[in-house]
C-alpha cells in the first residue's frame, strides 16, 4: 500500500484507501502512508462514525498520533507542521452505507462532524434490507433506500457516493445527484479504472482541499499533458500500453489512457481485441518488461488479426 499511495500521489491523482474495518490502526496506517482519503465499510451507528473520525483526526478533534515522515510528501509539501495544522480539514473520510442498521441510523451518522461522504454499497445494502439485486434488477424498496441516503447526505451538508455496474449507470447516478460514482471494473486497480474523463468521471465536487495542489475535482494534473507512451508486459503475460504518468523505485507504474491488448491463439476464431482501462496502476512485482512505444510502427499493425500462443510466465521452466 505504501508504494501504491506514493506512486499514485506523484502522478497527480489523489490516493484513496479502502481499509478492511473500522479499526484505528488500519486508519492510521493508511493516513500515515499519505492517503488523501479513506473508505471504511460496515459502519452501523453514529457511535461507529464518531470512532472513525476520532481515529482519522489529530487532537483536539481526534486521537490520531503524529509522526509519520511520509504523509506530508504525498501532498507535495515540505513541512510536517503544515501537515499537522491542515490535515484534519483536508483528508476525506468516507463511510459505506451498506447495512440495514446503517440505513436506519443514516441521519445520525450524517450529523457526525468529520464525516465527509456517505457511500452506498447497493448490493450489500439490498441483501441486508431483504431486497437483493437479482439479475441486475433493483427493487423499488432498494431504490427508495438509495434515495434516502442521497437525500440525507444533502440535508446534512455531506457528499453522497455509490457503486455502479457500468459507465451508463454511473452517469444516471450523477444525474440523480450523486457526487461520486465508482463503476465496476474487471481489474479495479484504482477508483478511475475503465473511465473516460470526458464522460462518467469519478470525482468529488467538495472544495475541502487546503493542503494539496492535487485537486479532488480533477484527478489528473493538466500540466501532465505530454507523458511518454509505453508498453508493459506483465509477469503473467498481459500486454498493456498507455501514457506513463508516474513510477517509483520499486517499479510501481501508473498509466493513463491504458489499453490492454488481448491476443487470441491461432486456433481461436474470435479476433484479438483491445480493452480500455483508463487510469491504471501496475504493481512493480508484476512488471516484466517496460519500454517506449513506437506509435508510427504500432499504427501500421492490424492488431485484430494478430495471433499468438503463450510461451510461459517468468517462472516457466
Image (cartoon, helix red, strand yellow):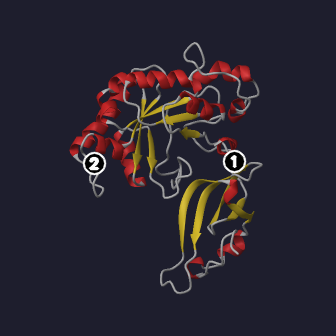
Q: Residue 267: percent from the left, percent from the top? A: 52, 87
In the image, what residue occupies the spot 67% across and 65% down? 235
The disc at residue 171 is none
C-alpha span from label 1 to label 2: 43 Å
In the image, what residue occupies the spot 70% across and 28% down? 68
Q: Residue 280: percent from the left, percent from the top? A: 60, 54
* Residue bearing mark 1: 224
- Secondary structure, mark 2, is loop
Looking at the image, residue 247 sits to the left or right of residue 237; the answer is: right
* Residue bearing mark 2: 132
In the image, what residue occupies the spot 60% across and 29% down? 28
From this view, report whether residue 236 is shown above or below residue 135. below
In which quadrant of the rendered image does the N terminus lie? top right
- Secondary structure, mark 1, is loop
Name of the residue lying farthest toward the left: 140
Closer mark to the observer between disc 1 and disc 2: 2
Tag 2 or tag 1, which sits nearer the N-term? Answer: 2
Amino acid at each position: 500500500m505504501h508504494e501504491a499511495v506514493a506512486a499514485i500521489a506523484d502522478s497527480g491523482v489523489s490516493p484513496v484507501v479502502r481499509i478492511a474495518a473500522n479499526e484505528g490502526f488500519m486508519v492510521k496506517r493508511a493516513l500515515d502512508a499519505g492517503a488523501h482519503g479513506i473508505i471504511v465499510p460496515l459502519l452501523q451507528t453514529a457511535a461507529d462514525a464518531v470512532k472513525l473520525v476520532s481515529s482519522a483526526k489529530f487532537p483536539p478533534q481526534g486521537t490520531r498520533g503524529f509522526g509519520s515522515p511520509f504523509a506530508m510528501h504525498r501532498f507535495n509539501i515540505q513541512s510536517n507542521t503544515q501537515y499537522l495544522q491542515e490535515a484534519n480539514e483536508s483528508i476525506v473520510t468516507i463511510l459505506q452505507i451498506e447495512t440495514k442498521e446503517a440505513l436506519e441510523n443514516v441521519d445520525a451518522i450524517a450529523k457526525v462532524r468529520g464525516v465527509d461522504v456517505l457511500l452506498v454499497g447497493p448490493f450489500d445494502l439490498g441483501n441486508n434490507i431483504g431486497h437483493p439485486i437479482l439479475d441486475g434488477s433493483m427493487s423499488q424498496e432498494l431504490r427508495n433506500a438509495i434515495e434516502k441516503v442521497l437525500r440525507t447526505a444533502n440535508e446534512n451538508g455531506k457528499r453522497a457516493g455509490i457503486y455502479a455496474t457500468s459507465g451508463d449507470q454511473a452517469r444516471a447516478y450523477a444525474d440523480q445527484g450523486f457526487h461520486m460514482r465508482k463503476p465496476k471494473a474487471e481489474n479495479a486497480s484504482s477508483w478511475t479504472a475503465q473511465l473516460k474523463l470526458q464522460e462518467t468521471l469519478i470525482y468529488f465536487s467538495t472544495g475541502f482541499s487546503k493542503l494539496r495542489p492535487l485537486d479532488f475535482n480533477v484527478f489528473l494534473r493538466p500540466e501532465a499533458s505530454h507523458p511518454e507512451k509505453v508498453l508493459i508486459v506483465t509477469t503473467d503475460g498481459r500486454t498493456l500500453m498507455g501514457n506513463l504518468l508516474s513510477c517509483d523505485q520499486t517499479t510501481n507504474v501508473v498509466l493513463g489512457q491504458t489499453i490492454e491488448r488481448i491476443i487470441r491463439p491461432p486456433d481461436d476464431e474470435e479476433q484479438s481485441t483491445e480493452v480500455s482501462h483508463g487510469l491504471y496502476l501496475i504493481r512493480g512485482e508484476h512488471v516484466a518488461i517496460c519500454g517506449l512505444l513506437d506509435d508510427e510502427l504500432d499504427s501500421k499493425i492490424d492488431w485484430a488479426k494478430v495471433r499468438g500462443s503463450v510461451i510461459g510466465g517468468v517462472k516457466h521452466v
